[in-house]
Image: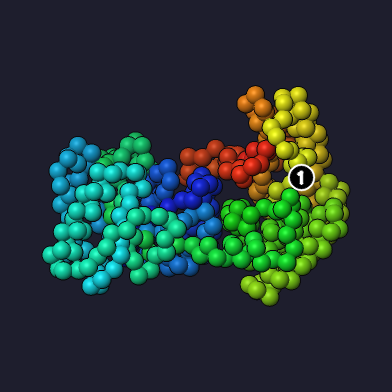
Amino acid sequence: MSSKYIFVLGRDQNLAKLEIVSILKQAEFDYEIEIDGANYLVITFKDKLNVNALMQRLAGTVRIAEVFSEPEGVTLQNFDVDLDIDIDKLDIYFPNKFNYTVHSLDDDAKLESEVYQLFKAHFKKYKIKAIKKSFSFSRKIGEDFEFLLVRENDSNNADANTSANANAGKILLARSVAAPDPNIYMEKDNDRPARKFTHGTSFRLAQMMVNILDVPLGKTVIDPFCGTGTFIIEGLLKGYNMIGIDIEQPLIEASKQNLNWAKKRFGFEGKYELIQADSTEVKFNADGCVFEPYMGEFLKKLPNFEKAKKDIEKLEKFYAKFFRNLTKNLNSASEYKNNARIVCILPYYRTNDNRLVHLSDRFFTQLPFKHVDLEKEFGLNLLNPIEYFTPSGSMISRQLHIFE
C-alpha cells in the first residue's frame, strides 16, 4: 500500500534534502519525490513507512507528516471557491477534547483559513471540544493534532515540465506523525565530559554529514581533524569503524573521554582508533573521510580584503598538502577507490567591505578528488558545494563539499 509524506526541513534546507535522499537510497526505499519545495519535500513511497525509526536517523528534518487528503479539482485557477473536503470521510479519529494547529508550509494564509473553517465546522457539528493553538515547531506532537498544508504549483513541482504538472495547484493535507527529540542533541552537546568550544562541530551537523557519506556500513571512516570526537561518535553510532587523528595530544585525550562516555550512554559495536599525528603526513587505511578542518586563526571581526586573501592562501597550501596525503591512504585501502567518498566543510571569508574570498578555482582543479554531481546522483537540483548556515557570531563562512 503506497503512502505519501511531507518531510519538513530545518534551517539548513539543502543539506537536509541531501540527507533525506542519502538515507532513502542507502536503505533502498522505493520512493519518488513528488514536490521539491523550498522548505519541504513531498515523497511517495511504495509501502507504509516506520516514520519514528526514520525520524531518528535524520538530523536535518523537523517533522514528518503523513498526507491524508488530496482534494480533487482544487487548482490555482479555482481556489477562490470553498475547499470541497468531507472531513467525515477522512481516516482520522478525533477524541472528544484536544488541541490542534493548522499551518501552511507555503505561508498561505488563505489556505490556512479555509482549512481552519472546515475543521471548526466539523468539531462544532459533533460537539468536539477542539482548541486551536498557535503553530510552532517547538511544540510537541502526540496527543495534540498538528495539520500541515501544501499547495503544489509550478515552482515546487518536482517535474514541472511534464504532463504531471497538469495537476499543479492541488492541495495536500497532512498530519504530523514524527518529530525529532531535541534532548538527544542537547545531551550530546552538554553532557559529554570534554568540551572545547573552538574545536567542535555540532552533533546535529556531524550526523547529517555522516549520513551523506556514501560508504557501506561496517567500513572504516577517518576524521583527520577529530578534535573532541564528535564525528567519531556519530560515525560509530551510524555503524562505521572510525579513526580519529589530531595533532594535539590534549584533544586526543578529550576524544577518549567523550568516546568512553558515548559508549556507556548510547552503545556502539564498531571499533575505533585515536592517533596523535599530523594529518598531512600520517599513514592510515580508510574507506571514507568526514571532517571539519583547521579554518585559520580565530577572528573577532571581519577581516579586510588583504588579510582575508593572505589567510586563504595559507589555508590552500595546508589543505593541498593534506588532500595529497589523504588520497594516498584512502585509495590504498578502498575496494572501490574511484568512489572513495569525502564529506567536509571548508571555509571562505567575507571581508569588512562585503567582498567574498574563496579557495581558488586552481586549488580545486588540482585536487585528486572531484565534486560529486548532486543532481545526477541524488536527483536534487543542488549545487556542490552547499552553503552551510554559519554559527552565530562566527567571522568565517562555511560550505559543505562532497568529493569522490
Quarter of the figure with the N terminus: bottom left
Q: Is residue 234 left or right of residue 13?
A: right
State the residue at coordinates (78%, 62%).
254
Q: Which residue shows up at 46% across the image and 51% down it? A: 9
Q: Residue at x 21, y 49 (%)?
A: 114
Indicate the quadrant containing the C terminus: top left, top right, bottom left or bottom right.
Answer: top right
| Above/below status of 33 relative to 262 | above
Residue located farthest toward the left when viewing the structure as drawn: 125
Q: Position of residue 193 (x, y in %)?
A: 73, 66
Q: Please state if 142 lies on the left or on the right of 188 as rendered.
A: left
Q: Position of residue 398 (x, y in %)?
A: 64, 40
Q: Is residue 316 above or below residue 87?
A: above
Mark 1 residue type: Tyr
Q: Nearer the viewer, residue 323 or 144?
A: 144
| Quadrant in which residue 321 is drawn | top right
Q: Nearer the viewer, residue 163 or 224?
A: 224
Dot 1 corresponds to which residue? 294
> What is the image's colouring?
rainbow
Callout 1 environment at 10 Å: few (<14), some (14 to 19), or many (20+)?
some
Q: State which quadrant residue 204 falls in.
A: bottom right
Measuring from the top left, give residue 14's x and y in whole percent: 51, 44
Q: In the image, residue 182 lies at what x, y percent? A: 53, 62
**Element type at marker 1?**
loop
> In the rendered picture of this protein, how many numbered marks are placed on residues?
1
Tell me which residue sits at (35%, 44%) in the image: 106
Relative vertical location of residue 347 with respect to residue 130 in this rendering, above or below: above
Residue 271 visible in the snapshot: no
Q: Seen from this angle, which residue lies furthest bottom?
A: 264
Q: Nearer the viewer, residue 188 or 365?
A: 188
Q: Can you see residue 261?
A: yes
Q: Quadrant of residue 52?
A: bottom left
